[in-house]
Every structure is written in structure tokens, then in C-alpha cells.
Amino acid sequence: MALAADRDPHVSWAPDRERRTGVAASVRGVSKRFKKSRILEDISFDVAEGESLVLLGASGSGKTTILRIIAGLEQPDQGRVILHGKDVTDLPARERGVGVIFQAYALFPRMTVEKNIGYGLKIRRLPRKERRETVNRLLKLVQLEEHRKKYPWQLSGGQQQRVAIARTLAYKPQVLLFDEPFGALDAQTRVKLRREIRSLLKQVKVPAVFITHDQEEALELGDRIAVLNDGHLEQIGTPDEVYNQPATEYVATFLGAANLLLGVVTQGCVEIGSARLPAARETARFREGQSVKLVFRPEDICVSQDANLPEGCRRLANGVIEEVNFVGSYERLNVRLDLTHRRQAEHEPPLYQVTINTPERMTGVPIMVTRPKPKGNATRYKAGDRVAVGLTSFSVLPNYTLARQR
Amino acid sequence: MKISAIRHVSGFDVARPVSIGVMLGIMLPLVLLPLLSIFIFGTSKGLGTFWSALVAPDAIFALKLSIVTSFWATLFNVTFGLFAAYVLSRYDFWGRNAVIVTISLPTAIPTAVAGFALLLLWGKYGMIGKFFSERHQVMFTPYAIILANIFVTFPLAFGVIKPVFDTMSRSLEEASATIGATRLQTFWHVTLPSLRGAIVSGALLTFARAVGEFGSTILVSGNLAGRTQTAPLYIYAKFNEGQIEAANAIAIVLALLSFVIFSVLFFARDWLEFETQEA
Ligand SMILES: Nc1ncnc2c1ncn2[C@@H]1O[C@H](COP(=O)(O)OP(=O)(O)OP(=O)(O)O)[C@@H](O)[C@H]1O
Ligand SMILES: [Mg+2]
């Protein structure tokens, strides 16, 4: 069920038309401690008008805390919160005009759907007639007209969530904040609802911040994604940037699977043992001889039994197929790369110590490769096949050995 | 609720009638018969006698006094209990637990001790009472009865309301705040409706307890018929005077009142809390 494709002009309101391209909300240098432990460290990001930003991070990384600070339910120790150019850091929650959709929706149990939605207007003492019109419009928007007289406990999880959204839309919030909006729902409903919400947000054009720890959800919901790790922001960018050009190892491994190899920058190449990967552009920001990490996704690898790799695929090394698995829609290969005689970087501890019996395997490095079904069917591999391995895309990250070198 | 019996044997289970019988056999002389005897004895001389005993001026006065004083005590204790529960579950401060224990203390104190303590405080030579002129003395007036009722029923409403506050999800109040409500609006529209059931049961409990209060009332009221004599004191006084019928008529009324309150408590709870049943 798609949301009502209602083109009612009243449905959409950008708080100020000419500021459409401006910044709706920004968090500047926010830090927070609870007791002795640091929860947030110097967090800064902007949410553009009409944009949806996803805060992605593991459990306990501080996502909810950021949301609560924006909403005014928590005070930051340092830093500012700015909504539409106005510093609201010292304003209480009720004066901020922020819409929060809580994880369990927090619908008022003693009020019907109608009354829940109309609550913000009642509080603002709007005339009854105006209230009724807005509520009707919102009921239509979230398609709950026939449920208007029901109480929250009589609704399904998805319906409750729509009531929660309508309840905040009623008072035209400056920004919508969603705390794990799909946490309580089953996998199928989640997918359906996030599409609905996405199209709803495009209709009403309210900027939104979503919290999730589901990477698929993040990639689908966000115009941009901010990856949070243990209280600090690792990277913020479009889904494409964050996925294809992860700024840190954490981002690379948190969002999808990634292979990681340690190497050294040598003459515009990344040198990994005996292998040399041409990467003039990617290594430009590193100095000669610097220790780096080569990060690449399983699906960005091409393998070939003759030495001819497809166009746009840079050769990395040769390898041996160790295992072939069919995993539903794609095929997974475990390949062990021949990477002997690796030159060690300055002050670097010895790297891979793979101790398996055959001489070849002693120095080999395992990587994971995925191939789409058609490709897998076109050329079948079996364990023991020797292949050439190339990369279509990868990123080169500095290899900090100590956290404080960041 | 469906109860499935534990069966060790198929067919007729002897344990069933025996255990039910034993249970009722214990309850009968201890609980059911005393209550029944009030009604049997009270109506044995015909309804006419019962009625005239009931409408005697002092009897009517005693009933009215009990109800009025209990009403004010209930009003006070529910309001205060609500307020105290709000403060104690929403703010953390030094000595918070000590306050919680203190509020609950009056339940553990014998009512006679409570009455005596009030006399010492408010009496003519008491710590507060000595500042009042002869004409404005509180003790041995209906106000003293209210004070005694407040004291002995103090923790009841609080005790019912506080757990509801504690288990209430904070996110409801937070949601209300982000929507734009002031604290007062949030309390009125969001917090209070969720407490409806607790408030009603707290009030009924307090009222039922206050109407029946004897130990402290007899000390602080002066027990003057037609002036400071509550219904339980009336029963005691008439019984001492040998007017069993008079005592019995009031006893029936008090017993019926308790039945009504108890039934409301028992059956209305579901109705009062219907919207949150699922939660
Ligand atoms: N009121 C509080 N008092 C003390 N510690 C807190 C408080 N709120 C949060 N924390 C701590 O802050 C850290 C971050 O919490 P937060 O709720 O922001 O995490 P999260 O990223 O939302 O996690 P999740 O995905 O599990 O919801 C946690 O370690 C948590 O224990
Ligand atoms: Mg959270």
C-alpha cells in the first residue's frame, strides 16, 4: 500500500521557501558525558532542507543521545544545536518545534488516533474547526481514515507508526527525528514501511534524521549517511560515497563486507608483498613508503582464468580458488592470493602469518569474492583453479597503528 | 480465566470437592458467618425496627460525619499522594528513599498511638495546640477527626499511585514535550489519564479505611453524640449502652458501604484501565 499520492498544496511546507537549499538543522561540536564515560565526542553535521540523513552506528554508539540532544530532551556538555539558523541549545524541548518519532512510538494510550494526531494543535489552542481540518488531511495522508476512532492498542505496529508520524506532522515540525523507526517490526513490514516513509517525506519536504543500525535501511533511507562509532563521527556522505569510498576501516567493515590488505605506497602503486596495484589517483595523498590499507568489496573483484581481465579492472595478483559457495542470489568464492616477498614498511610489525601446511599457502592471503549468478554460470570455477585477480574499485586508507594518530 | 485441574487420575477427582469444602469450611466461621450475623440479627425484629434505628438523629449524624470527614481526608490524601508520587518518581534528591519510607510509615503505626500522638501535638498543651486560643482548639472537633483520618490513611493512595508512575514510560511525557506541551499540559493530558485507575482505587481504598477508622478517632474526637461521634464510635457507644438494634443498623450500613466500595474496586479496575490492557 503506497501512501496517498495527495498533491494537496497544504500538505507540503518548507519552513521558508527561499531557504530551500539552506541548512535545516545543524549540530556543531557536540560532546556529552554521562557520569565518567564519554558518549559523544565533538559531533558536527548539517541536515539540509528536505534532506534525510541517517545516523548509522552499532548499539551504544550514541545515536539516540544525539537525537535527544537535537530534540532538547538532553543537554550537551559542549556544542550547539542550530535549527533553521537559530541557536536552540538553551531552549526546552517544547519550544524547538522538532518532531520525534520514538522507537516504541509513544502514542498516548488514552487518546484515539484522531486525538493523538490533534494533540499538538490542541496544545497550541487552535480553533476546533481548523484542528479538525488538519487532522482529516493528515488521516488521509497516512491512510488511517477508517481507524480514526480507534485507540493505539487496537492498531498494528505499522499503523501506530503512521499515527506517530501524523501526530508530529500536524504541528509542522522544523525537522523530524526517527529513532529506529522500524525496530519493532518484522522484516517484510520494515521494507514496505521505509519505502512509504521515504515517499511521504518527499511529499511533505520536511528534513529528517533517522537512526538505524541496519546498513540496508541506511542505504535506502538516507540522502546522506553519517556513520557513528563509539561516540565519534567516522564519515558522512551520500550512500554511494560511504559505501564505495569508505573513509575509515570501520566504515568499510560496518557497511557491507570488505576485504582488507596491508600495503605500502610505492611510485603511484600500492605494493602488497610481491603484488603492485596501480593506483596513482588513490595514493596521491600519501607519501612514498607510507603504510596503507587497501580496502575493497567482494563484489568489486574480477577473476579470470586467462590473464585477460576485463576493461577497467586493475590487476592485483594471482590466486588460487579455495572454495566455491552458492549463497542465494550470488556466488561466493574464497581466493587465496599469492603475495610473497612483501617489503615491510617502516616500524611495521610483521603482517599475515598464515600457517597452513602447503608451501604456497604459507604466504597466501585469503580474500572473499562475490559474483552475480549470470557470471557464475558463464564461467564455473572449482576449488584449486588458478586465477588472475583484479579490482574494479577500491579505496586506500592510511594505516594508523595507534588510535591517537587519527 | 480458565483453570485446569491437576489430574493424577482419570475420572472423578476426590481432591476437588474435599479441598474446596475445607477452604469454605475455614472461611465460614471466620469471615462469612460474622458478616451474615449482622444482617440476620439486624433484621430479625423486622424492617420497621431496623428503619427507626437507622433514622435516629444521632445515627444519621454519625453516618454523615463519618462520610464528610472521610471525604476530606480522602481528597487531601489523594491529592497529596499524587503530588508526592510525581515528585518522588520524577526527581532524584538526597534523602529520597527516607521520604518514601516516612510516607509509608503510618500504616505500621497502631491507630491508638496515632490518635495519642495527634493529641500531644494539637491538644491544648501540645506543641502546636498551645498557640491556639481556647475557642480555636482543633482537638475534639470534626477537624480532629479529619486530621486523624489523614494520618492513618496517609500512605494508601500514594502506595497505589507511585508504582504506576514508576512503570509509566517516560517517552510519553517526552513525546508530549517535543510536541510542544508545557509541564502542566503534559501532566493534565498525558500523565493524569494514565493514572485514572490508580487514582480511583487509591481514593476508594482511602475512603473505605477512613470511614471505618476507630482507634485514633475515639482518642481525638471526644466521642460526643451528635457532635463528634462517627459511625464506628456510634456502634461502640450504642453497644455499650445495650442498644444492640441501634448499633446493628449502623453496622449494616457500614458493611454495605464496604461491599459497594469493594465491588467497585474489584470490577471497575478493568473498566478504568481498559485502554492500556494490551500495553
Ligand atoms: N541517561 C543516561 N545515563 C547514563 N548513560 C547513558 C544514558 N543514556 C545513554 N547512556 C549511555 O550512552 C551510550 C550511548 O547510548 P545511546 O542510547 O545513545 O546509544 P544508541 O547508539 O542509541 O544505541 P542503540 O542502538 O542500542 O539504541 C550507552 O553506552 C549508554 O549506556
Ligand atoms: Mg538508541
Image (spheres, rainbow, N blue to C red):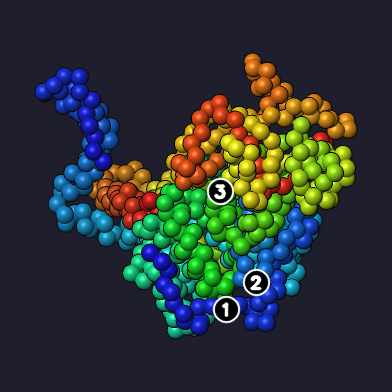
Sequence-first disc among 2 and 1 = 1
Residue to which mark 1 is pinned: A13
Picture coordinates of residue A34, whole percent (x, y): 72, 46
Residue drawn where x is 56% and y is 48% of the image: A214
Q: Is residue B15 left or right of residue B169?
A: left
Three-letter code for the amino acid on which mark 1 is drawn: Trp
Residue to which mark 3 is pinned: A214
Residue to which mark 2 is pinned: A49
Q: Is residue A288 above or below residue A360?
A: below
Sequence-first disc among 1 and 3 = 1
Residue drawn where x is 47% and y is 42% of the image: A378
Whether residue A48 is visible here, answered yes or no, is: yes
Which dot, 1 or 3, sits closer to the camera?
A: 3
Picture coordinates of residue A166, whole percent (x, y): 48, 68
Q: Is residue B36 left or right of residue B272?
A: left
Three-letter code for the amino acid on which mark 3 is drawn: Asp
Q: Is residue B205 left or right of residue B110?
A: left
Kindly indicate whether the residue at mark 1 contacts the one at mark 2 (C-beta within 8 angstroms). no
State the separation of the CA atoms marked 1 and 3. 30 Å
- State which chain disc 2 sits on: A
- In what element is the residue under mark 3? loop
- In what element is the residue under mark 2? loop
Picture coordinates of residue A307, whole percent (x, y): 63, 39
